[in-house]
Amino acid sequence: MRRIVRTAAAGPDDVVLEVGPGLGSLTLGLLGAGVRGVVAVEVDPVLAAALPGTVAERAPALAPRLAVVTGDALRVTPADLPGPAPTALVANLPYNVAVPVLLHLLEALPGLRRVLVMVQAEVADRLAAGPGSKAYGVPSVKARWYAEVRRAGSVGRSVFWPAPNVDSGLVALTRHDPPATSATRAEVFAVVDAAFGQRRKTLRAALAGWAGSPAAAEAALRAAGVDPATRGEQLDLTAFAAVAEQRSRPAPA
């Protein structure tokens, strides 16, 4: 917990969003770091109800800085969160929904400028992977629409009780502007999903359904400056956006 708080480097101007606070150990650490406030989103109503009491007992002077929202982080919107908009996300994300939660919050809460999350080690590798690596895939590309992504450390299973059967990793994200493109986020993500849906195939074949035919896919790829024989794991976000921009162009006769 202390390592996560230290690495997150949240300060007095930050409102921190925490997802899945559980028994509150990380919550107490964040409050103790002097942040402006912590908004904890907890789907379990029993844990959500207990958390304010835990903070009031262990750190009574900090209790006014905590707000608890009982709800599903996959569906949370700015209207669900009290007070000022969160500026940072610091969380031990539930491993089975870590990527969907992360992408949803980055999209729904544009005020999040910094993120530090603990996820399963394999997920951390996928999020931080670059083009050409075996771990590179849909999470790698989509996360980079919103932010710079880097591995921020590893966490062994022995620090948990009971010990899980997986290792964990820390991932840090720093918000940046999306790529300059005429394609929308949804249009770019549709290309990414299609490319990695059949990642062993060339992009000409993998994008045939997206484009309407293999010939249309090849035309879009060539217009974007991408070799149709390339596979999805070779393209970065900018290249995927360039392909998405070609969707409305007619295929050759």
Image (cartoon, rainbow, N blue to C red):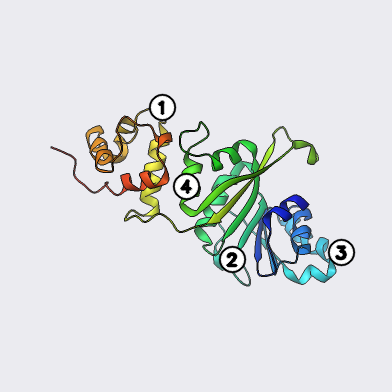
Q: Which residue is mark 1?
A: 200
Mark 1 residue element = loop
The reply to whether the C-beta atoms of the residues labelled 2 and 3 are less than 8 Å apart is no
Q: Which residue is mark 3?
A: 57
Distance between the Cα atoms at labels 1 and 4? 19 Å
Name the residue located 26 percent from the left edge and 41 percent from the top edge: 220
Name the residue located 83 percent from the left edge and 66 percent from the top edge: 56
Q: Nearer the viewer, residue 77 or 180?
A: 180
* Mark in front: 2 vs 3: 3
Three-letter residue code for mark 1 = Arg
Question: What is the quadrant of residue 87 in the picture?
Answer: bottom right
* Mark in front: 4 vs 2: 4
Three-letter residue code for mark 3 = Glu
Question: In the rendered image, which quarter contains the C terminus?
Answer: top left
Q: Which residue is mark 4?
A: 142
Distance between the Cα atoms at labels 4 and 2? 25 Å
**How dense is the environment of label 4, judged by Cα within 10 Å: few (below 14), some, or many (20 and up)?**
some
Q: Position of residue 228 (x, y in %)?
A: 29, 33
* Mark in front: 3 vs 1: 1
Which badge, 3 or 1, comes first in the chain's sequence? 3
Mark 2 residue element = helix
Three-letter residue code for mark 2 = Asp
